[in-house]
Image (tube, helix red, strand yellow):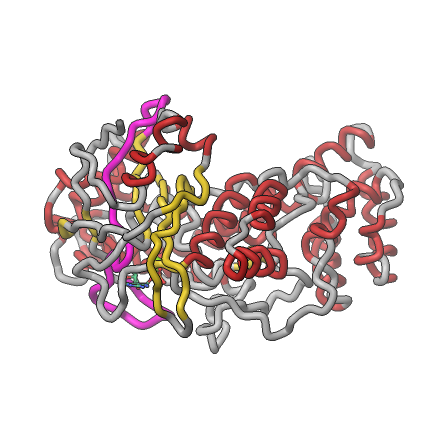
Amino acid sequence: MLNFENSFHKLNNNFYENVVPSKPPKPETISFNKHLSQLLGIKTSWIKGTEGLECFTGKQIIKSSNPLAMVYAGHQFGNWVPRLGDGRAILLGEILDQNNERWDIQLKGSGLTPFSRNGDGKATLGPVLREYLMSEAMYKLGIPTTHALFIAKTGENVYREKVYPGAIITRVAKSHIRVGTFQYFASQGQYDLVKVLMDYVIRRNFPEINNDRNKYLSFLKFVIDAQAKLISKWMNVGFIHGVMNTDNCSIIGDTIDYGPCAFMDKYNENTVFSSIDTFGRYSYKNQPIICQWNLAQLANCILPFLSNEKEKSIKIAQHEIDRFPEVYNDYFSKEIFKKLGFSHKMENDNKLKDELFDIMKQDELDFTLSFSNLYFKLLNKDNDLFEFTDKSRAFTKWISKWKLRLKKEKKSITQIAENLKKSNPIIIPRNHLVEEAIKFALERDNFSKFFKLLKLVSDPFKYKESNFNYYKPPNVLDKNFKTYCGT
Ligand code: AMP
Ligand code: MG
């Protein structure tokens, strides 16, 4: 039996609406995350059994749970929406893990809430499988993210452009509070609630700043730092979130709300996947600047707490927001130089890095393989994956220059190679593989391809020759590939 805590529920009832999850007609477990359930102290026998299934599909509400839907607002594609909220998500409560860390346990797709607007509060199987796979892959790539604990079919039909099987994903995170949560209260002038919310996040997620003299300025700095770090990690694996609205911007810097996200195959900084992103607002290259824009919205919400004088508060906030590019670039550089095997930055390293990105773009090289091939190149190990980079003469020329640069490193070739291997994933959940696995599951009710892919992306730095087909880019790149929102 689980014992939920309800710190958010107790905080202030302006932050949520009490809700009851819909009862699914015929719930059926698809999978659960063993490692995560163990961390949370959940017994395997319990989660595997009827009680686990009924808890994580909303069929039974555990006594200690106070289910709620959180309220928030947000800028969607730059347009202000004064009230959004959890339209298809229900927070069951929190669990303290073995290290006394507090995790939210949230159902996604379990029915209507007061924030459902025109939606049905449901989720379909495809996007649920997608989120399970993508969030696990991100976690294993070392990228902050919400986690997926449990996925199940509900046994009911959900109507979209077609009829799909309904499904529910149990999402776990150290916070579900978003920039949009702050915006909701600030936009209504309820600064007392902004303060309660901020104090809650500080106590729960950033305890180290609790005693700072200006802890609200520290809070802003912390969020900026966490977001800069997150986006730099996305950029270093070619991940495109797709819907970086302020309501999808987690206050603790997790990747949250897996909708139309995807990894790039061939490199182009203008890549956009989301079907609704007509103007490319959330393209790969725009992610840092959009992040900065989102953070400016947050800063705006907490101005009254930065100082007693309005003008001074604005100056302080502006200064912090202006620092974002520097903070971001620091993180990005550290990460990219690690990917190139440079232990510290030397003269011309930036140029060498820029040259590589130019070549990748010009010759339409695969993002992931351009980096993972470096390991094999350094060791002169022949590899079938070279065919995807060596068609570019510029790339092979660049490799010679890069090898010369590596001679200045104080480490042995073997050491550098080991570091390259750890920093450059060989496998990411490529669109065509994800789509194929989901299609197979939907059409045949057979999850074998899904589980196989899940297993491989859960060990993204491990190379095995026989997995070549999972490493290679799609044969014919579907230029019109689009991903859709709506889990
Ligand atoms: P998202 O695309 O997850 O960022 O969602 C944007 C907003 O739309 C959030 O307020 C969601 O709760 C809401 N929403 C999305 N899909 C549904 C749905 N099927 N039913 C109800 N609300 C939804
Ligand atoms: Mg969202």
Q: Visible in this render: residue 293?
A: no
Residue 237, how many percent across, how many down? 60, 51
* Residue 352 part of the magenta segment: no
Q: Is residue 40 above or below residue 174?
A: above
Which residue is located at x 13 percent, y 38 percent? 10
- Which of 195 and 422 lies nearest the eye of the viewer? 422
Give the vertical position of 101 relative to 309 (above or below): above
Q: Residue 17 appears at what percent x and percent y?
A: 14, 52
Quarter containing the C terminus: bottom left
Look at the image and tell me in which quarter the N terminus lies: top left
The question of residue 89 being in magenta is answered with yes
Residue 241 picture location, percent across and down: 48, 58
**Count of marks, rendered view:** 0
Q: Nearer the viewer, residue 245 or 315?
A: 245
Q: Residue at x 74, y 57 (%)?
A: 356
| Front in this rendered view, residue 417 or 211 | 417
Specify whether residue 252 is in view: yes
Q: Quadrant of residue 202 in the image? A: top left
Horizontal side, residue 231 vs residue 51: left or right:
right
Q: Position of residue 208 (x, y in %)?
A: 32, 29
* Residue 183 occupies quadrant: bottom left
What residue lies at 76% left-to-right and 29% top-to-bottom? 415
Q: Which residues are magenta?
A: 74-101
